[in-house]
């Protein structure tokens, strides 16, 4: 028979629902402003770049050529900053000066493009440096952070926090340390940042697509390959955006 006692799994699901509701209530104005920046960039032939280190790199991949997403989105990916080669090395690299600038040269973003940077703590060197470099190149920079986390810890070696280096900031409403559910003395489990980051990213992209459509433009929405007509539809998007996205 089912266990009648409240479960930690249920507590986690409830906590996530509450945080997503808080995001929807508090972040909508900024979501709309971010979407307008992105819609304007795409209308002018520009791109949205996505960057994150550690687990945040998954949010860069979340926006990359997926069904229901936008083809004008390019992830900035460097395997050393992910986790599959070495979590320890990744942690060291994201705190190393010069890494972000070196990675960005591969992508050659243009003035008027937009970059969204995901960093839960908002203090590590690579995300802050990426924001600073992108702004110097004429991009609009959007940060996605946990304000509560960032405000609870000292500024890192960059000298500023990501939210201070960005033009617009979305709060994922996470707790310091990311985990939501107490599971013992001083221990919590159940991270929020990936779920909340994807929630915010896709809300922004949906709004950007709708704004393009309202302007009489066909938004560059990718169609699931299993849908009728998807191959021809997506082939046109690939031809259009492959020159600016090395991962297509």
Image (spheres, rainbow, N blue to C red):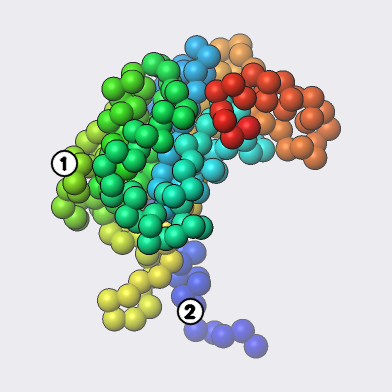
Which quadrant of the view contains residue 136?
Answer: top left
Residue at the image point whose x is 48% and y is 41% from the top:
77
In the rendered image, the vertical position of residue 70 relative to residue 161, given as above or below: above
Return the residue nearer the eye: 71 or 209.
71
Left or right, 120 with respect to 68, comes to left
Residue sitting at 44 percent across and 50 percent down?
80
Q: Which residue is mark 2?
A: 6
Say left or right for 107 vs 102.
right
Q: 200 or 132: which is nearer to us?
A: 132
Residue 155, percent from left and from top: 17, 48
Compared with residue 29, is residue 154 higher up or lower down, i.e. above or below? Answer: below
* Vertical comparison of 186 with 179: above or below: below
Pick whichever of labels 1 and 2 is earlier in the sequence: 2
Name the image quarter holding the C terminus: top right
* Residue 162 picture location, percent across and down: 27, 40
The local crowd at label 1, few if under 14, some if 14 to 19, many if 20 or more residues have their Cα within 10 Å, is few
The residue indicated by pointer 1 is 159
Q: Which part of the image, by quadrant, shows the N terminus?
A: bottom right
Q: Can residue 203 be seen? A: no
Where's residue 122, x and y in %? Answer: 28, 46
């Amino acid at each position: 028979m089912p266990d009648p006692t409240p479960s930690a799994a249920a507590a986690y699901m409830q906590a996530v629902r509450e945080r997503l509701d808080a995001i929807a209530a508090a972040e909508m104005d900024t979501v709309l402003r971010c979407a307008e920046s992105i819609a304007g960039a795409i209308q002018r032939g520009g791109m949205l770049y996505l960057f994150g280190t550690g687990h945040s790199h998954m949010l860069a991949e979340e926006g990359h050529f997926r069904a229901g997403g936008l083809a004008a989105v390019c992830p900035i990916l460097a395997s050393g900053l992910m986790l599959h080669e070495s979590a320890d090395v990744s942690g060291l690299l994201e705190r190393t000066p010069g890494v972000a600038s070196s990675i960005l040269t591969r992508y050659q973003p243009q003035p008027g493009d937009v970059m969204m940077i995901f960093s839960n703590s908002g203090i590590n060197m690579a995300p802050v440096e990426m924001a600073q470099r992108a702004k110097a190149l004429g991009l609009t920079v959007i940060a996605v952070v946990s304000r509560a986390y960032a405000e609870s810890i000292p500024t890192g070696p960059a000298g500023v926090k990501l939210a201070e280096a960005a033009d617009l900031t979305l709060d994922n409403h996470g707790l310091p340390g990311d985990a939501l559910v107490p599971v013992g003395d001083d221990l919590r489990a159940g991270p929020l940042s990936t779920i909340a980051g994807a929630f915010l990213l896709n809300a922004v992209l949906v709004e950007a697509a709708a704004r393009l459509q309202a302007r009489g433009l066909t938004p560059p929405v990718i169609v699931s390959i299993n849908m009728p007509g998807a191959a021809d539809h997506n082939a046109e998007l690939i031809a259009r955006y492959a020159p600016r996205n090395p991962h297509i």
